[in-house]
Image (spheres, rainbow, N blue to C red):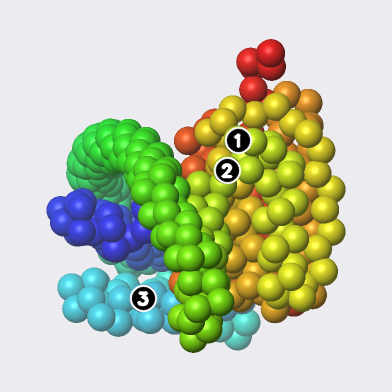
Amino acid sequence: MDVVTVVKRSPIVFPLACIAAVGMMFISEGSYWQAVGSLNQIGAMQESRAIIQNLAQSILDAESGQRGYLLTGRKEYLQPYQKAVGKIGDSFRHLDRYYGDDPGSMKALKDLHSLTDTRLSELAETIRLYDEGKVQAANELVLSDIGKEKMEALRALGAGLLARETSNVADRRGELYNTLLLSRIGMAALSAISLLALFLFLRQATAAEKHEQELKRTVQAERDRLEAEVTLRTAQLTELADHLQTAREDERNKLARNLHDELGALLTSAKLDAARIRSRLAGTAPEALERLAHLVETLNSSIALGRRIIEDLRPSTLSNLGLVATLEILVRDFAKLTNVEVHLALEPVELEASAELVVYRLVQEAITNITKYAKARNVWVGLAARGSDVEVTVRDDGVGFDTSAQRHSVYGLMGMRYRVEAEGGSLALESAPGRGTLIRVRLPQSTLVPA
């Protein structure tokens, strides 16, 4: 079943499947990119939180380095201080980029900038005073409450930024959870649509298959009916052909008897009368005698013609001399008329009288067709027993023909086949262009024991 057939049979299933596929792709891609965006934002927020915490820690590290230097006077304590100052600069550069599009957070960041710069200036000032030998002034600046107040303010600003980032992270996580929830709901809905489309398709396919099975059963029933009708019609045609052939032979037999009995008697009587008249006119009227002689010859020719017509209508030799002798006479007369060389292989066989007549008519029809169409130089006629059957063959070396092509002479062959089948036999035809023709007939032998 191709796609076009499915669409024609199921006009709803295909759009539902397309909607489900497009919906799944849209929801999957949308949820993916939205989740990726939320995760990226959460990652950036977590990084900013860490930088804010590191910023506060760096300020404390700077203070610790400054105080260690003031207490010990050792230069190595300035390294943590300088390192912390560098980290503070990096942190502010990152935060400036991060909060560049957030006006609310940017104000707090600017305040944090200002306080941090002021605090670092104080730390740098105490170190400068200490380096200049003004230790008392440096200690007084360290012990003042100004640094404490600024550190409290710095902690408050940092805590505020951390709280804002914590809130943003919570919001982004909520959005991510909502995205996942909507994705689940959407996928569930589209899965339900897909299942519905599958159900509709299966139902439609089942209905189509059932309809197809019904159609097949209907077609098979119609085919069986037609085959039965063809078989019946074939049997009727066979019976009709047998009846027509039988009627034809009966008419020929009747006509032959009439010709033999009535016309033969009339011609014979006329011949006898002519002979009597001739004997009485002997020596008296030569011209009349000549006319009577011509009349007698004409009567003899008419009697011979009548005999040939009678033999063609109903061969008397078939009843008097048997099938083999009758076929020999028929084929040798054919050879005399056509100058075709005939090869006979005839054996005595036991056949019903009607079957003997069928063999005679078959050979007669075959040599008639050879005379009309074959252009043969040799003809082989065979008659022999083959087990419980009698096989009759007529073969020629003529032009042959294509057995699959329709021919005008096919009705003669059809008549042969019907007559043979009516006697319970079979007929096979073999031929090809340029290879001659072979007719092979098998008939059941007679079951009657000759007296």
Can the viewer see residue 275? yes
User: Which amino acid lies under the numbered mark 3 shown in the image of this protein?
Assistant: Tyr
Residue at 15 percent of width and 53 percent of height: 12
Can the viewer see residue 139? no
Image quadrant where residue 71 sits: bottom right
Question: Is 193 left or right of 159, judged from the image as shown?
Answer: left
Q: Tell me residue 46's x, y (percent).
A: 42, 58
Task: Between residue 427 and residue 89, name the one nearer to us.
Answer: 427
Residue at 70 percent of width and 75 percent of height: 338
Upstream in the sequence, badge 2 or badge 3? Answer: 3
Question: Is 83 left or right of 25, judged from the image as shown?
Answer: right
Q: Can you identify the residue that label 2 sits on? A: 316
Q: Can you identify the residue that label 1 sits on? A: 319
Q: What kind of element bears circle 3? A: helix
Cα separation between marks 2 and 1? 6 Å
Q: Is residue 88 above or below residue 382?
A: below
